């Protein structure tokens, strides 16, 4: 940023200095041309017919027959060099003056082919010194009516000297301005990029220590402040995600510990009995094996629930049209097998929704499993699907009003259910699946006791609508 600022200032100052130098040069040249015109017989006219030169020069031109003799009077006026040119291109140097290089344009002026001419040229003064001069060549006629021209020259030292000094001064001012702008740009860049340095330090600290509690200041309303707020929001989201993962792992470990402990106890008992050479009674052995089987089933269910919950939201299954009534019918069949002493009554109407078939069926199974688990022996579970609303009603102990806000939390189990099988993930999965399908789910006390689960899913009674 400092280099860009210095470069921009350098270009601006250089442009201004160059413009100032050119304007000054043009003004000095204009003044020199005015002096040349004033002392050479007045401002020259625009055409090839000009006023005659001062009379002494006219007489010298008339008598000019080659190079004049050395010495003699200086040319009239303040000129460095005065040189006469006739129509045939011959030159005649005024006594005491130097000589000029004649150009084709000068000869054209002498022949009357063009008007007065201002130009820069090279000359040799009377003492033999080469010099850069400003030349005015103007036409005139001799007393005999012949065309001719006179070239008047002034040294450019009085113009080029001040211009050289001005160029040095402007170069020094430009350099000073560039240095000052570079210093100011450096200070401004450091001040403006300090939040970026803090952000960089915070990112490096997080990458090194994985400490997501780092925050950077959020002062101001500019882009840097917005970047800081976005970074803080990102770290806050990452912290929350890490906390959710930590809780999920801790809760999963807690839930896995119980079936694993029971499995290890039962298997150790079987191994000790076999090692001691004493067979367990057949009923006891069968109970142990049934317990092992139940714990394995609980572990399988828990692992499946964990895999379902660990799936990222953005990596959800492909949505397709699902016959919800068919998925509910299959869930009812499974519920009847799991609760042989219960009556499961189903009344379903066709309803098609957009979602994942396996997930929707699992949600229905979880709702029915929950109803079966809390229903007393011989009770009835009512399942209805009408108008896109699925209801599951049991006649169990119900849910306390204080527990209703927590029923969809992961691993949450009411005090009355902690002695029953389950991981506390079933209703969490139901809530997630229903939300992915754009629906709503709620649990409420049922009239006359028990719990009523309501699931509302958008869809239609015919596929494709």
Image (cartoon, rainbow, N blue to C red):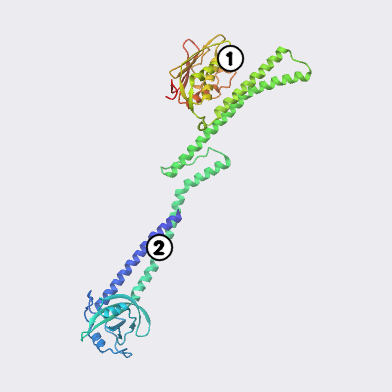
Determine whether label 2 and label 1 are within 8 Å by CB: no
Decide: few, some or many residues near mark 1? Use Cα within 10 Å; few <14, some 14-19, many ≥20.
few
Residue at the spot 62% in from the left edge and 21% down from the top edge: 297
Residue at the spot 31% in from the left edge and 69% down from the top edge: 26
Q: Does residue 231 lie above or below 290 as drawn? A: below
- How far across and how far down the image is residue 136, in percent? 28, 77
Q: Earlier in the sequence, mark 2 or mark 1?
A: 2
Q: CA distance from mark 2 to mark 1?
A: 94 Å
Q: Which mark is residue 175?
A: none
Q: Nearer the viewer, residue 214 or 133?
A: 133
- SS at circle 1: helix
Dividing the picture into quarters, in which one does residue 72 lie?
bottom left
Disc 1 marks which residue?
337
Quick check: 29 left or right of 253?
left
- How far across and how far down the image is residue 128, in percent? 37, 84
Quick check: 288 left or right of 45?
right
- How far across and how far down the image is residue 309, in percent? 55, 27
- How far across and how far down the image is residue 55, in percent? 22, 85
Residue at the spot 58% in from the left edge and 14% down from the top edge: 337
Residue at the spot 35% in from the left edge and 72% down from the top edge: 162
Residue furthest to the bottom in view is 69
Q: Nearer the viewer, residue 70 or 309?
A: 309
Disc 2 marks which residue?
174
The C terminus, quarter of image: top left
Query: Do we see residue 62 in this rendering?
Result: yes
Query: Do we see residue 409 in this rendering?
Result: no
Mark 2 vs mark 1: in front: 1
Residue furthest to the top in view is 378
Dividing the picture into quarters, in which one does residue 339 lie?
top right
């Amino acid at each position: 940023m400092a280099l860009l600022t210095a470069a921009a200032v350098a270009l601006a100052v250089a442009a201004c200095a160059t413009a100032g130098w050119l304007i000054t040069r043009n003004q000095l040249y204009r003044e020199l041309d005015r002096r040349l015109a004033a002392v050479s017989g007045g401002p020259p006219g625009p055409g090839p017919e000009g006023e005659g030169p001062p009379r002494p020069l006219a007489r010298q031109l008339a008598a000019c027959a080659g190079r004049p003799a050395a010495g003699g009077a200086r040319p009239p006026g303040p000129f460095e060099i005065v040189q006469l040119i006739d129509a045939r291109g011959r030159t005649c140097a005024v006594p005491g003056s130097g000589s000029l290089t004649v150009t084709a344009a000068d000869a054209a002026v002498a022949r009357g082919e063009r008007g007065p001419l201002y130009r820069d040229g090279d000359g040799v003064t009377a003492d033999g010194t080469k010099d850069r001069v400003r030349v005015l060549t103007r036409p005139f006629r001799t007393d005999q009516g012949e065309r001719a021209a006179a070239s008047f020259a002034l040294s450019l030292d009085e113009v080029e000297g001040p211009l050289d000094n001005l160029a040095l001064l402007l170069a020094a001012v430009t350099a000073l301005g560039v240095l000052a702008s570079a210093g100011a740009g450096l200070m401004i860049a450091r001040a403006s990029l300090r939040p970026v340095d803090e952000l960089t330090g915070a990112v490096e600290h997080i990458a090194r220590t994985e400490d997501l509690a780092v925050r950077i200041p959020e002062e101001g309303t500019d882009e840097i402040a917005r970047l800081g707020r976005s970074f803080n929001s990102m770290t806050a989201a990452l912290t929350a995600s890490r906390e959710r993962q930590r809780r999920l792992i801790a809760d999963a470990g807690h839930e896995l510990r119980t079936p694993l402990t029971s499995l290890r106890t039962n298997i150790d008992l079987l191994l000790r009995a076999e090692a001691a050479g004493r067979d367990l009674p057949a009923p006891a052995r069968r109970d142990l094996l049934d317990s092992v089987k139940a714990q394995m089933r609980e572990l399988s269910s828990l692992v499946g629930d964990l895999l379902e919950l660990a799936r990222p939201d953005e990596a959800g299954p492909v949505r397709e049209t699902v016959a919800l009534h068919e998925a509910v019918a299959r869930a009812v069949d499974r519920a009847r097998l799991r609760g042989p002493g219960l009556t499961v009554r189903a009344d379903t109407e066709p309803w098609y929704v957009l979602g994942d078939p396996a997930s929707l069926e699992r949600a229905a199974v979880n709702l029915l499993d929950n109803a079966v688990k809390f229903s007393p022996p011989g009770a009835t579970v009512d399942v209805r699907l009408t108008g896109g609303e699925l209801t599951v009603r049991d006649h169990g102990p119900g849910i306390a009003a204080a527990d209703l806000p927590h029923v969809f939390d992961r691993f949450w189990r009411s005090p009355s259910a902690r002695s029953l099988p389950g991981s506390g993930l079933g209703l969490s999965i139901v809530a997630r699946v229903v939300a992915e399908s754009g629906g709503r789910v709620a649990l409420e006390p049922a009239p006359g006791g028990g719990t009523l689960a309501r699931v509302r899913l958008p869809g239609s009674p015919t596929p494709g609508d």
